[in-house]
Image: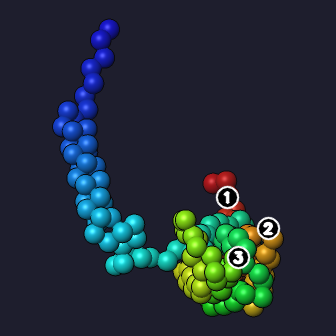
Amino acid sequence: MVLLDVRDPFESTISREISKLQNEMNTLFERFFGRSFPFARVQNYPAINIYHDTDNLYVTAELPGIKIQDLDITLEEDSLTIKGQKSSDSGDDINYYRKEREIGQFNRVVSLPIRIVPENGKATLKNGVLVITLPKAEEAKPKKIEIKLG
């Protein structure tokens, strides 16, 4: 028995050409602007995960080296704001070979996917990971439907 490959024969060629073109464009932009494009700076700091269980919504954020006194967390019914200040871990008279970790203020606003009870939110910071626990509003919690035999 012989199996035939029925994939589009042009698909891999097209995707390779698009990938090649994208790499060439990236190289041109890097030569002109340097490694970071001034018009494409999107701040996604801190990196976050959002997940939930039956009763709570959880937001975890990576904040290495941040002190709790340098954080400000604001919670509204449909959004969460994490503000803070990243300080330099070295003096001003340092000459860097490479500097990828930025310092200064950050502000991350996250839209929450479900309704929560803002007054009962709590946060902990341990080993550079911020964990925010937000209780779900009653209307956002799953409801059990009873099945009746008919």
Task: Point out the frontmost of discs 3 and 2.
Answer: 3
Which label belongs to residue 64? none
Is residue 11 toward the left or the right of residue 140 in the image?
left
Dot 2 alpha-carbon crowd within 10 angstroms: few under 14, some 14 to 19, many 20 or more: few
Q: Which residue is mark 2?
A: 127
- Which residue is drawn at the image coordinates 68% and 80% (left, top)? 91
User: Disc 3 marks which residue?
Assistant: 89
Q: Picture coordinates of residue 78 (x, y %)?
A: 58, 86
Q: Quadrant of the C terminus?
A: bottom right
Residue plotted at (67% across, 58% down): 147
From the top left corner, tell me how far across and down residue 23 is, in percent: 29, 53
Residue type at mark 3?
A: Asp
Residue 130 in which image quadrant = bottom right
Give the structural element (helix, strand or loop) at label 3.
Answer: loop
- Residue drawn at x 52%, y 74% as measured from the top left: 44
On screen, residue 39 versus residue 70, left or right, reads left
Marks 3/1 in contact by CB < 8 Å: the verdict is: no
Is residue 97 in sight in this rendering?
yes
**Secondary element at image label 1:** loop
Kindly report which numbered mark, 1 or 2, lies closer to the viewer in this rendering.
2
Q: Residue furthest top?
A: 1
Q: Horizontal and vertical percent for residue 106?
A: 58, 84
Q: Are marks 1 and 2 in contact (CB under 8 Å)?
A: no
In space, the residues marked 3 and 1 are separated at their CA atoms by 60 Å
Which quarter of the rendered picture does the N terminus lie within? top left
Q: Residues within 10 Å of mark 1 (few under 14, many from 20)?
A: few
Three-letter code for the amino acid on which mark 1 is drawn = Ile
Tell me the residue that label 1 is attached to.
Answer: 147
Choose the circle earlier in sequence order: 3 or 2: 3
**Mark earlier in primary sequence (1, 2):** 2
